[in-house]
Amino acid sequence: MTKDSISKFDAADYLDSEEAMAAYLNAAMEEDDPDILLAAIADIAKAVGMSKLAKDAGLGRESLYKALKPGAQPRYETIHKVIGALGMTLQAKPRTISMQ
């Protein structure tokens, strides 16, 4: 098998329903890494269409790309707009460990 015969994995290819997108986003939020969350949102944005999502969120396409790149520190307002444009909400749930 040659390097050219192996295709690169792209999560966006598998995010074909709202349920799949929500599950993917929830899994990313369980990690303690903001870059993983941004990468998950970027994968979902790619699956939906970056230009469409930017328009629906009221953002410029370039601004959306910048906000979702690794190491970016987007404002909460930006993430809130993007998540809302995806038809989703962020929710809190209790941790399994006690907060004593």
Image (tube, helix red, strand yellow):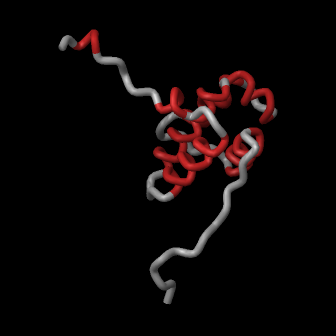
* Residue found at x 67% / y 56%: 90
As rendered, which of 25 and 99 lies closer to the eye?
25
Q: Position of residue 30 (x, y in %)?
A: 49, 59
Q: Position of residue 8 (x, y in %)?
A: 37, 22
* Residue found at x 23% / y 13%: 3
* Residue found at x 45% / y 56%: 31
**Viewport quadrant of the N terminus:** top left
Task: Name above or below for residue 97 compared with residue 53.
Answer: below
Q: Residue furthest bottom?
A: 100
Judge from the rendering whether residue 11 lies leftward or rightward of residue 56; answer left or right: left
Q: How many marks do you count on the picture?
A: 0
Task: Name above or below for residue 48 compared with residue 77.
Answer: above
Judge from the rendering whether residue 16 lies leftward or rightward of residue 4; answer left or right: right
Q: Quadrant of residue 78?
A: top right
Q: Quadrant of residue 20?
A: top right
Q: Position of residue 84 (x, y in %)?
A: 76, 45
Q: Quadrant of residue 55?
A: top right
Task: Name above or below for residue 98 compared with residue 72.
Answer: below
Q: Residue furthest left?
A: 1
As rendered, which of 29 and 15 lies closer to the eye?
15
Q: Position of residue 61 (x, y in %)?
A: 69, 24
* Residue found at x 48% / y 40%: 71
